[in-house]
Image (cartoon, coloured by chain):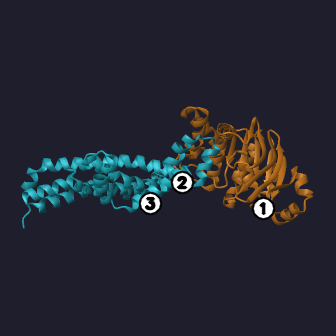
Chain colours: A cyan, B orange
Amino acid sequence: MSFDTTVIWQNLPALAAGIWLTIAIVVVSLAIGIVIGLLVCAGMLLTRGFANYMSVGYVGLFRAVPEPVIIFWLYYCAPLILNSKLSAFETGTIALAIPTGAYLAEIFRAGIQAVPRGQFEAARAVGLSPLWLVWDVVAPQALRMMIPPMLGIVTILIKNSALVSAIGVEELFYRATVLGGQTFHYFEFLTVTAVIYFVLILPLSALVQRQERRLLGNVW
Amino acid sequence: MIVCEGVQKFFGRFEALKGVSLEVARGEVLCIIGPSGGGKSTFLRTINALEAIDAGRIRIGEINLPANRREVLELRREVGMVFQSFNLFPHMTVRRNVALAPVRGRGLSWQEANSRAERLLARVNIFDQVDKYPSQLSGGQQQRVAIARALAMEPKVLLFDEPTSSLDPEMVQEVLQVIRELAHTGITMLIATHEMGFAREVSDHVAFMADGRLLHFAPPREFFDRPSDPRLNAFLSKVL
C-alpha cells in the first residue's frame, strides 16, 4: 500500500476545476436558497391564508424529502412536465437550493421571533417607520442569532454538493471518482478529496464556534 | 391636549378597557394608579397606538385615533413612551439609542442627533456612559437612558408605563427624580405608577383605574385625603 502523490499533481488542474465548480454550486444554490428562504419566511410571518399555508407546506415538504430524490426528480421527471430540460449544473444547483431555502426559512423565522416583543414596541414607540424598524432594530439582533445555524446550513450544503455528481455535474467528488477510475488510484484521489472538503468547511466551523462564544458572552 | 371618549379595548373576549373617558390639559401631569391588570398599561398604550382601540375616540393634539398608518407614525413622533422593562436597543451604544429616532424620524444628521443625545444624557445624569452598551448599565441608569431616548424626539406628550416597577429599590429615587424634574418643563405626562408619594407630589390630577374602568379622577390632595370611592378606599388602605 503506497500513497502516490505524483498522480495527484499530474491531475491537479482537473481537481482544481472540480473545486471551483463545487464552490460555484454552493454559492449559487445558497444565493437562490436565501431568496427562497426570505420569501417563505415572509409568507409564514406576514401573511394568513393561502400564502401562509403554501409557506408552511413548502418547509414541511422539503425538509422531509431526501436531497438525492429532489435532484433525480428534477433531472428526470421535471422535464416531462415542463417540456424543457435544464443543464445538469442548473438542475443540481436548483435541486440543492430548494431544501436549503426550506431550512433557511425556518432559521430566519426563528431568528426574527427570538427578538423580544419589547424591541418592536420600543422601535414603534419612538416613531421608526417599518423599514427602519427592521433595518435598525430587528435585523441586527435577528441576524446575530441566525449566524451559527446559517453557517451550519452552508456546511451541509458543501457536503451535499457532492450529490449532484450523480447527474453528471463535474464537481470535486465527480472528478475524484472519474480520475480514480481512470488511473486506478481511488485511494489517493478520494483521500485528497476528503481533505479538500474538510479544508473548505474548517473555517466555517471555526466561525460558528467564535460566534457562539460571542453569543454566550453577550458582547456586541 | 388629550381627550379620550369611551375608549374600549378587547383582547379576544376579554374587555381590558370598558369605556374610559378623560381629559388631560397641555402641560399637565396625570398619574394613574390602581391594581395590576386593571387597564393602566393598556390605556397608556392606546394613546400612542401600540394598542388599537375597538371603540371610542382619542384626540392627541391634532391627531384623532383611530388613524391611518401615516398619522400613527406622526403621532408616535409626538408621543414618547418609557416602558417598565426599559426596552433599550441592546446592540447600540447609549448615545446611538438616543440619537437613532431623531435621525430616522426627523431628518437630523448623525452629528446633530449625537449632540442632542449627549445633551439629554447629561440632563439625566448619565453623560459619562454614552459609549457603553445598555447591558453594562444598572437598571436605574438604563431607565434614565430610556427617558432620554423618549425626549430626543422632543415630544409633546410622555407616557410612563410603571417606570420604576422593575427597578431595585435603591434605584427608584434616581429615576423618579428625573421624572420630577421633567414635570416642571411643561411637557404633558401620563404616568402609570405604584409610587403613591410620588403621585401625590408631582400630579395635577390622579386617576384610579380598576377592572378596565376609570373609577376616580381628582386633584391629588382630594384624591388621597378624601377618597370618595369605596374601591379606591380599599386599594389605598392596602398600599399606603
Quadrant of residue B62 within the rendered picture: top right
Eye-nearest disc, 1 or 3: 3
Q: Which amino acid does the dot numbered 1 rest on?
A: Pro
Picture quarter with the C terminus of chain B: bottom right
Q: Are marks 1 and 2 in contact (CB under 8 Å)?
A: no
Residue type at mark 2 is Val
Can you tell which of label 3 and label 2 is closer to the viewer? 3
Provide the chain ID for the residue under circle 1: B
B198 sits left or right of A19 in the view: right
Mark 3 Cα-neighbour bin, 10 Å: few <14, some 14–19, many ≥20? some
Where residue A150 sits in the image (x, y, percent)? 39, 54
Give the number of the disc on residue B14: none
Task: Say if A197 sits above or below A128 in the image.
Answer: below
- For disc 3, the chain is A
Q: Quadrant of residue B28?
A: top right
- Residue B177, can we see it? no
- Residue under the point 85% across and 62% down: B236
- The answer for how far apart the CA atoms under marks 1 and 3 are is 45 Å
Per the image, the residue denoted by label 3 is A60
Q: Which residue is mark 2?
A: A115
Alpha-carbon span between mark 1 and mark 2? 29 Å
- Kindly indicate the quadrant of the structure image that contains residue B124: top right
The Cα–Cα distance between marks 3 and 2, rounded to whole angstroms, is: 24 Å
* Figure quadrant of the N terminus of chain B: top right
The secondary element bearing badge 2 is classed as loop
In the picture, measured across the screen, residue B222 lies left or right of residue B40, that is right
Identify the residue under disc 1.
B35
Q: Secondary structure at mark 1?
A: loop
